């Protein structure tokens, strides 16, 4: 799988609610993957840039959960914001399965595409809510 497709799939899985992953993934998951790293939670430092282009600065820390597993010859990794280790484990298993060329197209069609559509709908709804509360300021010129 090429890097950009894998990044897209991992992003969709990490940003989707765990409830949806629990609905979609279990039928295709193997009963016992070989865990290279069971879920663990730790902290990561977030960095920012002033104006998006300036010098880097440490913005703050965020909790992250990660897991790694092997299914057949494929190793999958899962990272997710927060302390939900089960979410990270599901992502790792999905990542390993998505690397199998025999399953990839079906899994992208059955998992990633519907989740991607749902994410786009949620983002659009959030944008509409924000746009509805937008305030326009203006200044009147006083006649002098």
Image: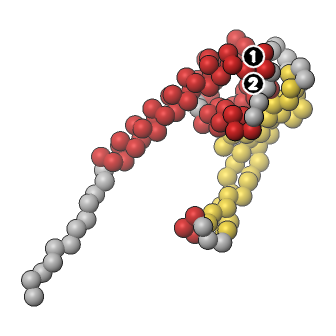
Residue furthest bottom as drawn: 144
Q: How many marks?
A: 2
Q: Is residue 11 above or below residue 114?
A: below
Disc on res. 98: 2
Rendering coords of residue 104 (x, y %): 73, 20
Q: In the image, residue 39 lies at what x, y percent?
A: 79, 35
Q: Residue at x 21, y 72 (%)?
A: 139
Which quadrant of the structure image shows residue 16? top right
77 to the left or right of 106: right
Residue found 89% across the figure and 20% down from its top: 72
Q: Measure how far apart labels 2 and 1 are at the Cα level.
A: 7 Å
Where does residue 135 sit, x and y in percent of width and height? 28, 57
Is there any visible trace of residue 28 in the rendered image? yes
Q: Is residue 118 above or below residue 61?
A: above
Q: What percent of the width, then of the height, locates residue 92?
A: 77, 30
**From this viewpoint, which residue is outermost toward the front?**
2
- Do callouts 2 and 1 mark residues in contact (Cβ within 8 Å)? yes
Q: Residues within 10 Å of mark 1 (few under 14, many from 20)?
A: few
The residue beneath circle 1 is 103
Q: Secondary structure at mark 1?
A: helix
**Vertical side of 49 occupied by 90: above or below:** above
58, above or below 86, in the image: below
Q: Residues within 10 Å of mark 2 (few under 14, many from 20)?
A: many
Residue at x 85% of width, y 17% of height: 32
Q: Nearer the viewer, residue 46 or 63?
A: 46
Query: Which comes before the other along the chain, label 2 or label 1?
Result: 2
Compared across the picture, whether 12 is left or right of 29 comes to: left
Q: Residue at x 67, y 52 (%)?
A: 62
Please indicate, yes or no, whether residue 39 appears anywhere in the rendered image: no
As drawn, the residue found furthest toward the left would be 143
**Residue 115 position by quadrant:** top right
């Amino acid at each position: 799988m090429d890097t950009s497709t894998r990044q897209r799939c991992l992003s969709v899985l990490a940003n989707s609610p765990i409830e949806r992953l629990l609905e979609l993934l279990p039928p295709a998951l193997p009963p016992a993957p070989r865990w290279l790293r069971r879920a663990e939670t730790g902290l990561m430092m977030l960095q920012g840039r002033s104006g998006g282009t300036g010098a880097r600065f440490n913005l703050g820390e965020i909790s992250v959960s990660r897991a790694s597993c092997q299914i057949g010859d494929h190793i999958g990794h899962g990272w997710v914001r927060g302390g939900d280790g089960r979410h990270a484990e599901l992502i790792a298993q999905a990542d390993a399965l998505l690397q199998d060329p025999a399953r990839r197209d079906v899994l992208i069609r059955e998992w990633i595409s519907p989740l991607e559509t749902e994410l786009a709908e949620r983002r659009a709804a959030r944008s509409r809510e924000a746009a509805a509360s937008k305030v326009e300021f203006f200044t009147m010129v006083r006649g002098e």
